[in-house]
Image (tube, helix red, strand yellow):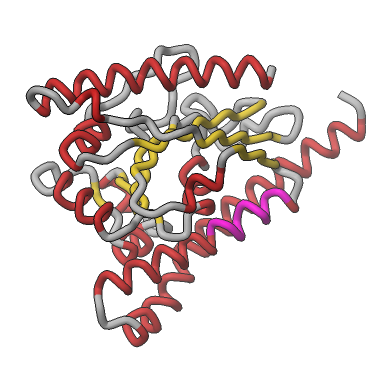
Amino acid sequence: MTLTARANYLWRLFATGLAFAVFGISGVLIPLLAIPSLYLLHRDKLRRQIAARRMVHMMFKCFIHMMRLLGILSWTTEGIERLNRKGLLVLANHPTLIDTVFIMAFIPNANCIVKSRLLNNPAMRSFILQAGYIANDQSNSLIEEAGASLESGSNLVIFPEGTRTTPGEDLRFQRGAANIAIRCGTDITPVIINCSPPTLSKDRKWHDIPARPVVLSFWVKEDIPISAFLEGPATLGARRLNEHLEQFFTREIRKHGHQDS
């Protein structure tokens, strides 16, 4: 490694640590400062949640631009205008820790299904509660809440793997996203995400940064209609749709990963 390359690597390592620190501190302070004004300006709960989501959207948008200015990463998009519609069920693969940050930065009124353990994270708890994000342990009411969110015009974001992709392993989706699509009668807007070189994956810590800056690529594909999966019992339709989604995402990830290599 040349002296210039070494200096660039050390800068990006420092900048990555700085970005994580800024994210954590902002996640605690911004909601504390903003929550009183949300309650003063919006007495209606739904309006308050939408305002909170827009706050998250702006914060995450600033965050990804900060990372680009620091030289940590850059990104490309294709078909991103498809996310401007309302009431979408957005499904994406999950190669990195910051996929959620980017998707939320692209969508002003995004709801999402989050891991319930994130409520124990001080940098995320206030965001989750104020924005009305749906905890994945609410099994009895999850589909009902998801349907209400879609009907209100919010775009519901789900990572059907349930966790970050394990490199080298086959794609395996939990059936919850397919279940929501079938029971709510909602077509699916797929987002294919590629990260090159790999970073912040399940097997890498934040400080395991690659030798060169990261490029994240986002392809928003045409909607996947669910009409072919609605015949017969909903459980069977969800299983068939889930298998179709696994095949679709596996094929698209391989295609775009090959183009990027």
Helix, strand or loop for the magenta stretch, by majority: helix
Which residue is pictured at 50% across the width and 57% down the height? 24
Residue 176, by quadrant, is top left
Which residue is pictured at 32% across the width and 58% down the height? 153
The stretch drawn in magenta includes residue 67: yes
Horizontal and vertical percent position of residue 136: 23, 43
Looking at the rendered structure, the number of numbered marks drawn on it comes to 0
Residue that sits furthest to the bottom in the current view: 40
Quick one: 64 or 30, which is closer to the camera? 64
Quick one: 249 or 36, which is closer to the camera? 249
The stretch drawn in magenta includes residue 159: no
Quick one: 190 or 232, which is closer to the camera? 232
Horizontal and vertical percent position of residue 173: 31, 24
Q: Is residue 178 left or right of residue 193?
A: left
Write the start and end of the magenta stretch as one range: 60-68
Residue 219, by quadrant, is top right
